[in-house]
């Protein structure tokens, strides 16, 4: 992990949540933990961002939730991708992968002559 946390760009949290739920149903803390661990602790999702994003995804019909009893015996709201959400996830992931590839090409490009 670097000394400076990475700030999420607008719209990136939704795709990270969708991709995380693509692996299976999870409660909010598990979603946050998965993103943190998968990023090597570079991305830490605060509750104040996570739960509004989950509500937004539910309103879009991309995520559904239900109450379940966790392994520790506590009630936890578990989130699951809907079929519409699964299609949205594939589309959003593909769009972000393209964006990252294009951005990396520009950052790595070297001029062949004058750029002026």
Image: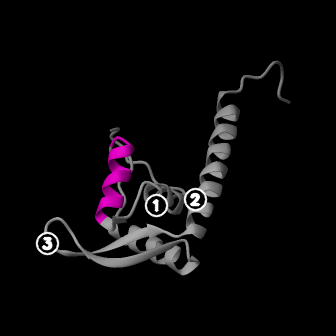
SS of the residue under disc 2: helix
Q: On the rendered image, what quadrant is the N terminus found in? A: top left
Residues at badges 1 and 2 in contact (C-beta under 8 Å)? no
**Could you tell whether 36 is left or right of 111 in the image?**
left
Q: Residue furthest top?
A: 112
Q: Closer to us: mark 3 or mark 2?
A: 3
* CA neighbours of label 2 inside 10 A, class few (<14), some (14 to 19), many (20+): many
Q: Position of residue 61 (x, y in %)?
A: 56, 77
Left or right of residue 52: residue 44:
left
**Horizontal and vertical percent for residue 59?**
54, 81
* Label 3: element kind: loop
Label 1 belongs to which residue?
17
How dense is the environment of label 1, judged by Cα within 10 Å: few (below 14), some, or many (20 and up)?
Answer: many
Q: Earlier in the sequence, mark 1 or mark 3?
A: 1
Badge 2 is on which residue? 89
Residue 82, how many percent across, how many down? 52, 70
Mark in front: 1 vs 3: 3
Is disc 1 placed on a helix, strand or loop?
helix
The residue lying at 66 percent from left, 51 percent from top is 95
Left or right of 69 in this view: 58: right
At horizontal 13% and vertical 67% (from top left) the residue drawn is 72
Residue 55 painted magenta: no
Q: Give residue 7's position: percent from left, percent from top.
A: 45, 53
Magenta stretch, residue numbers: 29-40
28 lies left or right of 60:
left
Q: Check disc 3: other Cα within 10 Å, few if <14, some if 14-19, many if 20+.
A: few
- Furthest residue to the front? 83
């Amino acid at each position: 992990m670097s000394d400076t946390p990475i700030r999420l760009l607008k719209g990136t949290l939704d795709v990270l949540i969708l991709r995380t739920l693509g692996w299976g149903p999870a409660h909010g803390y598990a979603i946050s933990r998965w993103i943190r661990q998968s990023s090597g602790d570079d991305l830490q999702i605060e509750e104040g961002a996570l739960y509004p994003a989950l509500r937004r995804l539910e309103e879009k019909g991309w995520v559904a939730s239900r109450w379940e009893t966790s392994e520790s015996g506590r009630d936890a709201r578990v989130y699951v991708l809907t079929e519409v959400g699964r299609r949205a996830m594939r589309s959003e992931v593909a769009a972000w992968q393209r964006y990252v590839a294009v951005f990396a090409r520009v950052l790595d490009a070297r001029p062949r002559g004058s750029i002026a």
